[in-house]
Image: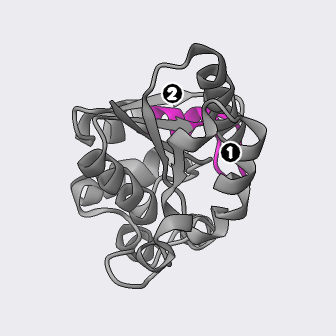
Amino acid sequence: MIIGLVPGAMKPYHAGHHFLVQKASNECDSVIIFTTTKDREAIKGSNMKKVWDDIIIPQLPSNVKVEFVVSPVGSVYDTIEWEETKKTGWKYRIYGGTEDISRYNTKAIKQRWPNAGYRFVNVAEEEANRYLRGRGESPNAKGEWVRNSILTQDFKKFEEFLPEILSPYSKEYLNILLS
């Protein structure tokens, strides 16, 4: 069993996040998105949760589930800790951008968790060129840019940052975030 972990605040969920989820879904048997319902800048966590429930989750591949947690990063480390004692033999792939390479350093993980660490791979660390924002298949989207389009109520720009599967829902998505 190969499990993909996609941690992030994802406020809001944009094309870059969806790129990671799609990669994980194609490469893994099961995928877990770890995200939060905490507020972030102008985005209320409760509004983002509504977007997840009403719009995003129904569009995700069937092997993807979303878990709302206190800390997405902490949840990855909780998973490693759990595996250290349970020893399921499952393999894990951690999906994040190149900015997250140091956050999930596989050498450090292997040293701290010798029983489980070798079963965890940070895909951006392994293949950085595939996960550089705006390079190759990776979309040129960043949470800060998307939040700015929301603050300025630039509907066209907001829509440009969404994955294609969410384009039909872009107005509803933005209206929920602004409510």
Q: Judge by depth and name the residue closer to the eye, 77 or 48.
A: 77
Res 145 quadrant in image: bottom right
Q: Position of residue 61 (x, y in %)?
A: 23, 40
Quadrant (top left/top right/bottom left/bottom right) for the C terminus: top right
Residue 36 shows up from this direction: no
Against 83, residue 30 (above or below) is: below
Q: Is residue 163 left or right of residue 48?
A: left
Please tell me how many numbered marks the rendered image carries.
2
Few, some or many residues within 10 Å of mark 1 (<14, 14–19, 20+): some
Q: Position of residue 156 (x, y in %)?
A: 38, 75
What residue is drawn where x is 37% and y is 50%? Answer: 21
Q: Nearer the viewer, mark 2 or mark 1?
A: 1
Q: Amino acid at mark 1?
A: Lys
Q: Amino acid at mark 2?
A: Glu
Q: Is residue 123 left or right of residue 30?
A: right
Q: Is residue 48 left or right of residue 70?
A: left
Magenta run includes residue 46: yes
Numbered label attached to residue 67: 2
**Highlighted magenta segment, given as a residue range:** 35-51
Read off the residue under disc 1.
Answer: 110
Against 83, residue 13 (above or below) is: below
Residue 165 shows up from this direction: yes
Q: Is residue 6 left or right of residue 172?
A: right
Residue found at the far bottom of this picture: 135
Counting residues from the start of the chain, the first of labels 2 and 1 encountered is: 2
What residue is drawn where x is 43% and y is 29%? Answer: 90
Q: Judge by depth and name the residue closer to the eye, 124 or 53.
A: 124
